[in-house]
Image (spheres, rainbow, N blue to C red):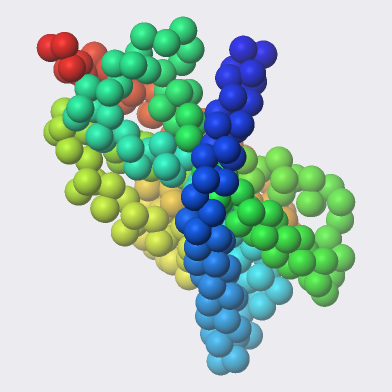
Amino acid sequence: MFRYLRLYAHFLRFSFGRAMQFRFDFFFRVGMDTLWYAHYLAFFGVLFLHTERLGGWSRDEARLFAGTLFVCDAVQMTLFSNNLWQFPLAVNRGDLDYHLVRPVSTLFFVSLRDFAANSFLNLLMAAGVLVWAISVHPTPLPAWRIALFAAVLPFGILVHYCMQLVFLLPAFWLHSGSGLRDLYWSLDAYTARPVGIFTGWTRRLLTSLLPLCVVVSFPVRALVDPDPWPAVLQTIAVAAGAFLVLLFVWRRGLRAYASASS
């Protein structure tokens, strides 16, 4: 464990040093996400001019949803996105060989090597929006609810990570991940929709087999539902299942991988 922490500290130092060499990109990404946050909050504001509830949630609960969405997206962009974006290229060019020979988990190295320091400030802004949404909620939220929410949120982020990587792993067999990557980003829009707006088989699909609505909506349900435990237990179960599927497909993919020396 300590070896991995030391290694990750080196990743952080390298990533922040590189980000300071490209300051325009650093501030451009901050500005881009700031506009997205403002646009999304304004979008909810317009919706609630015409309705009192959206998917069963009030304006204040929708703000909690938006803040949670911003945090999940910022974590994904900061920790994983740069790495996963490069994964199909690493498979195609044989660059994965360099990771396979290292004395650490290849999955760890592939997923976390590049820390997007230029997205880290966005993560702080997203956390600020979430804290604001909690503080202005008309009914004070109990401390145990906030703690439960904080405990469940990493499981939602884990589901998001697993889903994205599972969509890229067919690159081991197809030798191209661009189509599946684009498909995933199209489907990823469902994470930005409250689960309550879906019904019937669509809702069952988006909370089980393709659990994109679990990522954000279920941690918020743990915060605001009268009985939070069904949402909590389902989030944990879905995260565990998604991670097991990821490990299974990852191991099968490594067996099929044709290295640069093949």
Q: Is residue 221 visible?
A: no
Pick out the residue farthest to the bottom: 50
Q: Is 28 above or below relative to 252?
A: below
Quadrant of the image occupied by residue 251 = top left
Q: Please name whichever residue, 77 or 190, is drawn nearer the observer in this view of the structure.
A: 77
Residue 48: x and y, percent? 60, 85
The image quadrant where one finds the N terminus is: top right
Residue 81: x and y, percent? 43, 44
Q: Is 18 above or below relative to 254?
A: below
Tell me the residue at 21%/33% (across/down): 171
Tell me the residue at 50%/63% (across/down): 28
Image mark count: 0
Residue 74: x and y, percent? 56, 52
Q: Is 260 above or below relative to 185?
A: above
Q: Is residue 146 visible?
A: yes
Pick out the residue farthest to the front: 21
Question: In the figure, is residue 87 to the left or right of 7?
Answer: left
Tell me the residue at 49%/31% (across/down): 112
Residue 102: x and y, percent? 42, 10
Q: Please name whichever residue, 82 or 68, is drawn nearer the observer in this view of the structure.
A: 82
Quadrant of the image occupied by residue 188 = bottom left
The image quadrant where one finds the C terminus is: top left
Q: Please name whichever residue, 89 or 172, is drawn nearer the observer in this view of the structure.
A: 89
